[in-house]
Image (cartoon, helix red, strand yellow):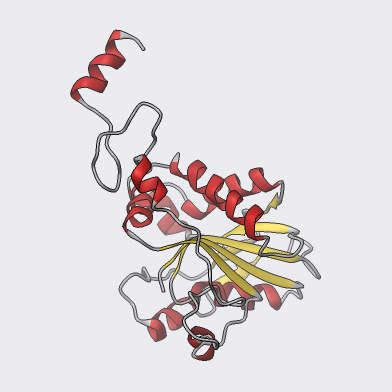
Amino acid sequence: MNILQTFIGLFFPKTCLSCDERLLENEQFICSNCNNSLKFLENICIICGALKTTSECKVCRTNEFQFDKARSVFMFNKVVQNMIHEFKYNEMTQIAKFMGMKAQEYIERFQPFDHIDYIVPVPLHKVKKRSRGFNQAEYLTQEISKNMNWKHLPKLIKRKKFTETQTKLNKDQRKKNVSFAFAINTKYDIKGKNILSVDDVFTTGATANSITIALKEKQVNKVYVLTIARAL
């Protein structure tokens, strides 16, 4: 470590994104305590991936999910929320590497999906992507694709309709907001293939459903959904 790095570390120490504790030299983004609080989401519905509270999944019962299976690596807690916020809105794109590693650990441990032919990001509309400068789902997909050796098709799905942010919308509003929002690039032959769609957060499943409908119109075999966090 040179003198400049020592000076910066002394007077401008790196702190945890979640609890603001000073990070040790071998820690990145979050401290060991916050990292240890990240637990894989278990005891879930085998279809929608929601936390299971009864023998019958209440989430599946009150929704008409079109995808074949959805999984989330973590429940949406403060640590995950802060990481995703910094990743999306403060351009800490290096967090994607950490999340991609955690997603790989989850997939290898639980083996939630059958054979995956293509992995695809949930796309941003070109206006929103131009404003933000990048698509966080694409960064995540790149990392997971590399880690799992799955073929990445970042241009398979296009968001053809500009939609308002889903954050403050209720379930019905979310569904209407993303209805018919996606189109499939016909240059790719996906008939009979298994597709894994990747995003940062699963809330109501409206986006995942809309993408699934568009994909299944092209006669894919199965559509799986993977997100870093589960909000419900």
Looking at the rendered image, the quarter that the N terminus falls into is top left
Front residue (pair 131, 67): 67
Q: Position of residue 223 (x, y in %)?
A: 67, 71
Q: Can residue 75 be seen by looking at this rendering?
A: yes
Q: Residue at x 63, y 76 (%)?
A: 67
Q: How many marks?
A: 0
Q: Residue at x 64, y 68 (%)?
A: 224
Q: On the image, which quarter does residue 177 sit in?
A: bottom left
Position of 195 relative to 15 (above/below):
below
Q: For this view, does 217 lie left or right of residue 37?
A: right
Q: Position of residue 215 (x, y in %)?
A: 67, 72
Q: Residue at x 48, y 71 (%)?
A: 161
Front residue (pair 98, 40): 40
Q: Position of residue 220 (x, y in %)?
A: 75, 72
Position of 24 relative to 109 (above/below):
above
Looking at the rendered image, the quarter that the C terminus falls into is bottom left
Q: For this view, does 164 lie left or right of residue 101?
A: left
Q: For this view, does 54 lie left or right of residue 158?
A: left
Position of 37 relative to 46 (above/below):
above
Q: Position of residue 24 (x, y in %)?
A: 33, 30
Q: Can residue 185 be seen by looking at this rendering?
A: no
Front residue (pair 228, 166): 228
